[in-house]
């Protein structure tokens, strides 16, 4: 079980660290907010999880009965797959959902799934992110992107959304 947690969580947490660092480098006001208030790291991590949502699609679910959602009939036995980034950026739930806001009053996000289907390693991932992100900013206060943000190579084809290579200067 421990080995499964380690390997299952490594790729997603590593991706989240890279994306979170990129987000802080491209949103200096939010970055400074965390530097000035490191005690806010818990809510910052939750906002980054919502904003970035590295796992692009939830597991498929099969409808147990006919159900209507958003004016669309989903028939018994049909497969439904949740686009988690869309749910985490729903303007009916989040104000200015396409912007990271480290002072956001968080409602539930779906970065780790929902209900009984939540990711087993979510508490370990949160602890890792709460530990690493303030330390990156503390140890590298002058960290900047070495290339324009739109030139940072991204992985958009795999299971997880990720930074392929984060080129920085100090």
Image: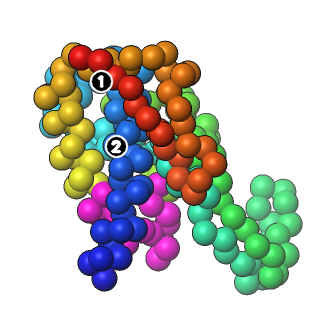
Q: Is residue 136 left or right of residue 59?
A: left
| Residue bounds of the magenta highlight | 111-125
- Give the x, y percent position of residue 125: 30, 57
Disc 2, SS: helix
* Residue 101 can be seen, yes or no: no
Q: Which residue is mark 1?
A: 31
For the C terminus, give its image quadrant: top left
| 76 lies above or below 14 | below
* Residue 169 can be seen, yes or no: yes
Q: Residue at x 29, y 18 (%)?
A: 169
Q: Which numbered circle lies on residue 152?
A: none
Residue 8 versus residue 113: which sits nearer the camera? 8
Q: Residue at x 84, y 57 (%)?
A: 71
- Cα separation between marks 1 and 2: 14 Å
Residue count near mark 1 (Cα–Cα under 10 Å), binned few <14, some 14–19, many ≥20: some
Q: Which residue is mark 2?
A: 17
- Give the x, y percent position of residue 9: 36, 63
Q: Residue at x 18, y 25 (%)?
A: 140
Residue 169 versus residue 128: which sits nearer the camera? 169
123 drawn magenta:
yes
Residue 40 versus residue 126: which sits nearer the camera? 126
- Give the x, y percent position of residue 106: 39, 44
- Give the x, y percent position of residue 60: 66, 71
| 126 lies above or below 45 | below
Q: Residue at x 34, y 33 (%)?
A: 21
């Amino acid at each position: 079980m421990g080995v499964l947690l380690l390997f299952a969580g490594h790729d997603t947490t590593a991706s989240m660290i890279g994306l979170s660092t990129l987000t802080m480098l491209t949103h200096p006001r939010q970055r400074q907010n965390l530097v000035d208030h490191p005690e806010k790291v818990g809510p910052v991590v939750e906002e980054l999880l919502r904003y970035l949502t590295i796992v692009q699609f939830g597991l498929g679910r099969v409808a147990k009965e006919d159900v209507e959602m958003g004016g669309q009939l989903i028939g018994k036995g049909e497969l439904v797959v949740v686009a988690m980034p869309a749910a985490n950026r729903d303007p009916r739930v989040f104000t200015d959902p396409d912007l990271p806001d480290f002072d956001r009053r968080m409602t539930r996000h779906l970065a780790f799934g929902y209900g009984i289907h939540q990711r087993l390693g979510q508490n370990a991932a949160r602890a890792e992110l709460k530990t690493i992100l303030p330390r990156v900013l503390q140890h590298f206060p002058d960290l900047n992107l070495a290339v324009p943000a739109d030139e940072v190579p991204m992985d958009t084809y795999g299971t997880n959304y990720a930074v392929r290579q984060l080129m920085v200067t100090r």
